[in-house]
Amino acid sequence: MNVEVAYATSEQQIILSVKVEGSCTVDQAIALSEILTRFPEIDLTKNKVGIFSQICSLNKLLQENDRVEIYRDLALNPMEARRQRAIQQGR
């Protein structure tokens, strides 16, 4: 079965294609992709994961062509960023 594992930083985005066994979990796909060696800052006890933008658990079973996404915290809350832009623009 083919799945993808995706992660993005502010500098880059990576989507890795992985061939997995028929009954593979999100956690197993992440391990097989070896994405954790490329991005050591990923901590699966803290980072949320999902499949096509739907948050799920690490033990969720995958289906053919699923895309596992590893999420990171936002660097800045969108409301705070908007407030800071307004201050800079003199509003």
Image (cartoon, rainbow, N blue to C red):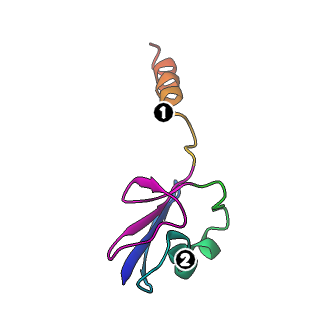
* Residue bearing mark 2: 28
Q: Residues within 10 Å of mark 1 (few under 14, many from 20)?
A: few
**Residue that appears at 32% across and 74% down:** 65
Viewer can see residue 36: yes
Neighbour tally class for label 2: few under 14, some 14-19, many 20 plus, Cα within 10 Å: some
Q: Which residue is at 44% across, 13% downward?
A: 91
Q: Is residue 80 above or below residue 32?
A: above
Look at label 2 and name its amino acid. Gln
- Which SS class for mark 1? helix
Locate the N terminus and report the quarter of the image it occupies: bottom left
**Residue 22 among magenta residues:** no
**Which residue is the extreme one toward the left?**
65
Q: Position of residue 69 (x, y in %)?
A: 46, 62
Q: Nearer the viewer, mark 2 or mark 1?
A: 2
Q: Nearer the viewer, residue 80 or 42?
A: 42
Which amino acid type corresponds to the residue marked 1 in the rendered image?
Pro
First to last magenta residue range: 48-72
Q: Position of residue 27 (x, y in %)?
A: 56, 71
**Image coordinates for residue 44, horizontal then vertical, percent:** 63, 62
Which secondary structure dominates the residues rendered in magenta?
loop
From the image, tell me which residue sits under label 1.
78
